[in-house]
């Protein structure tokens, strides 16, 4: 045992030299949330994480204000647009005409270069008159 004591006295200083020197610094708290002094660039990241985890739904919020029109509604709108275009083409050729839909009555008359478009709302009875002058009556 006596031989171990001198070996320990020699190895202890050598071990302290072989271990890498360590240094300690004080811990500094850096907040993440911008509300508490953190980096403002973290705000959108934190908000997106919170919204992704949110499972609660607002009972007053409508799911969607836009409703996809049905195929029949799209076809009807397309047909009405086509008929109105044809009516305007016929007026350009010197003919007058009328288009009646579920919602409106459209009357188009060409009087010697003065185009009169009378639109009547069938549900309320409101009438709008559009007069365009300066058209060439020979078209």
Image (cartoon, grey):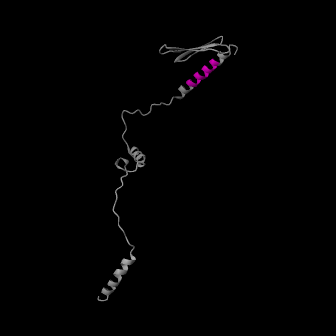
Decide: is 33 above or below 112: below
Hey, which residue is sitting farthest left in the picture? 1
Hey, which residue is sitting farthest top in the picture? 111
What residue appears at the point 35 percent right and 82 percent down from the top-left corner? 11
Q: Is residue 101 left or right of residue 34?
A: right
Quarter of the rendering containing residue 89: top right
**Residue 42 location, x and y as percent?**
41, 49
**Residue 88 location, x and y as percent?**
63, 18
| Residue 81 or residue 45, whichever sits in front | 45
What residue appears at the point 30 percent right and 86 percent down from the top-left corner? 5
Hey, which residue is sitting farthest bottom in the picture? 2
Q: Is residue 116 left or right of residue 17?
A: right
What residue appears at the point 66 percent right and 17 percent down from the top-left corner? 92
Quadrant in which the N terminus appears: bottom left
Q: Is residue 77 left or right of residue 92?
A: left
Task: Residue 10: say if magenta.
Answer: no
Q: Main secondary structure of the magenta part?
A: helix
Quarter of the rendering containing residue 138: top right
Q: Which residues are magenta?
A: 76-88
What residue appears at the point 37 percent right and 32 percent down from the top-left corner? 60
Decide: is 20 above or below 118: below
Quarter of the rendering containing residue 133: top right
Q: Is residue 96 left or right of residue 6?
A: right
**Residue 25 location, x and y as percent?**
35, 64
Decide: is 117 above or below 30: above
| Residue 5 or residue 65, whichever sits in front | 5
Circle count: 0
Task: Residue 85: say if magenta.
Answer: yes
Quadrant in which the C terminus appears: top right
Decide: is 63 above or below 119: below
């Amino acid at each position: 045992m006596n031989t171990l004591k001198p070996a320990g006295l020699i190895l202890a200083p050598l071990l302290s030299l072989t271990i890498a020197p360590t240094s300690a610094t004080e811990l500094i708290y850096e907040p993440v949330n911008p509300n508490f002094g953190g980096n403002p660039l973290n705000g959108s990241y934190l908000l997106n994480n919170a919204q992704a985890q949110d499972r609660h739904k607002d009972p007053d919020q409508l799911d969607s204000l836009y409703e996809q029109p049905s195929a029949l509604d799209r076809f009807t709108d397309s047909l009405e647009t086509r008929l109105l275009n044809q009516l305007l083409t016929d007026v350009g050729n010197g003919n007058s005409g009328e288009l009646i839909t579920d919602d409106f009555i459209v009357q188009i008359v060409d009087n010697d270069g003065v185009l009169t478009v009378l639109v009547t709302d069938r549900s309320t009875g409101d009438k709008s008159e559009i007069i365009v002058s300066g058209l060439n009556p020979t078209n």
